[in-house]
Image: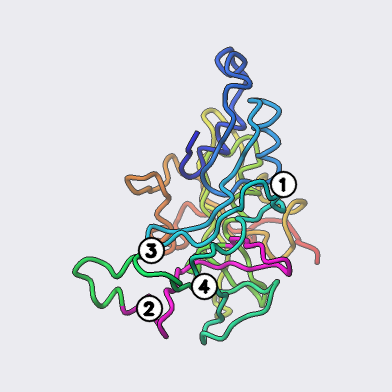
């Protein structure tokens, strides 16, 4: 099964039914976006799947990491650097970062004709991503001491709030654990403190009566204090592209709307 976006989480948490029981053990591999360990466990216990998650990382432009046959992979990792590529983690000034520290994933090929040569008739866009002769993926990642790679977030979706870095991917995975949430986007809105405030824009499952305040109180016990969202908004539908990916840039541009709930209007007090 090859799954796009949040479908892997939604299917893993779907209500029991006869079709699910009949196909138990028939699905041996489930791949798509990175899955949390909880979601992987659901696929194993509910569907009998044996291989869950994509232990490789790449883009249309280049396949950057892979997993050697038979090698065990640490939880959350997308494998090792593919031998055909030189892959590094850079800071915003293109300085290499040490293992364990997150930064932008950059790469360059070690052999000819294995990576894209540029965007068709978009020379300026090609120049933007090829700084210092490195292809800049626009993704945040890190390597551990053993050389295993971990995807952290899209660079444009990575948040910095009150001095703390927050991964929207990790936050979305946490919110999707709530049984009344069907789809979610975690994104930044501008803060009057000069950095970002965090907003959760979500779609509830049909018939759910979950309130914004109830969701926020539920999150207080499940995410770091600095990642508890200031804003929450429920929508009937989230804006998506033809591939089903949520258009976060649109949600960022819309910011705080008249329908947005604000934690500062509640009695919730987040403790460090």
Q: Residue at x 62, y 48 (%)?
A: 69
By what rule are the colours in the image chosen? rainbow
Q: Is residue 190 above or below residue 94?
A: above
Q: Residue at x 70, y 71 (%)?
A: 100
Mark pair 1, 3: CA separation: 47 Å
- Report the mark closest to the observer, 1 or 3: 3
Secondary structure beneath label 3: loop
Q: Are marks 1 and 4 in contact (CB under 8 Å)?
A: no
Alpha-carbon neighbours of circle 3 within 10 Å: few (<14), some, or many (≥20)?
some
| x, y percent for residue 270 | 76, 61
- Report the mark closest to the observer, 1 or 4: 4
Horizontal placement of 256 versus 113: left or right? right
Residue ID for mark 4: 86
Residue ID for mark 2: 130
Horizontal placement of 136 versus 40: left or right? left
Q: Quadrant of residue 10?
A: top right
| x, y percent for residue 116 | 33, 65
Residue ID for mark 3: 114
Residue ID for mark 1: 218
- Report the mark closest to the observer, 2 or 4: 4
Q: Residue at x 61, y 61 (%)?
A: 80
Horizontal placement of 136 versus 167: left or right? left
Q: Quadrant of residue 126?
A: bottom left
Give 271 or 71, whichever is nearer the viewer: 71
Mark pair 1, 4: CA separation: 43 Å
Q: Are marks 1 and 2 in contact (CB under 8 Å)?
A: no
Q: Earlier in the sequence, mark 1 or mark 3?
A: 3
Q: Is residue 191 above or below residue 263?
A: below
Residue at the left extreme?
121
| x, y percent for residue 72 | 71, 49
Q: Which residues are magenta?
A: 127-152
């Amino acid at each position: 099964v090859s799954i796009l976006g949040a479908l892997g989480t939604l299917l893993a948490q779907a209500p029991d039914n006869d079709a699910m029981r009949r196909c138990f053990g028939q699905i041996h591999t489930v791949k798509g976006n990175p899955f949390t360990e909880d979601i992987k466990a659901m696929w194993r216990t509910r569907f009998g799947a044996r291989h869950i998650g994509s232990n490789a990382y790449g883009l249309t432009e280049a396949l950057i990491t892979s997993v050697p046959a038979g090698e065990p992979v640490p939880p959350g990792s997308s494998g090792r650097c593919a031998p055909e590529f030189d892959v590094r983690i850079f800071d915003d000034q293109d300085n290499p970062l040490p293992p364990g520290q997150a930064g932008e994933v950059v790469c360059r090929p070690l052999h000819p004709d294995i990576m894209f040569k540029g965007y068709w008739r978009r020379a300026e866009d090609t120049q933007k991503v090829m700084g210092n002769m490195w292809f800049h993926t626009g993704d945040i990642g890190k390597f551990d001491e053993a050389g295993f790679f971990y995807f952290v977030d899209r660079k444009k979706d990575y948040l910095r709030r009150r001095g703390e870095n927050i991964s929207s991917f990790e936050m979305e995975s946490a919110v999707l654990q709530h049984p009344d949430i069907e789809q979610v986007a975690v994104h930044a809105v501008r803060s009057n403190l000069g950095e970002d405030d965090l907003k959760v824009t979500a779609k509830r499952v049909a018939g759910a009566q979950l309130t914004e305040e109830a969701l926020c109180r539920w999150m207080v016990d499940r995410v770091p204090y600095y990642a508890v969202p200031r804003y929450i908004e429920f929508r009937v539908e989230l804006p998506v592209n033809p591939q089903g990916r949520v258009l976060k840039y649109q949600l960022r541009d819309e910011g705080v709307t008249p329908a947005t709930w604000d934690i500062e209007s509640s009695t919730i007090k987040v403790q460090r």
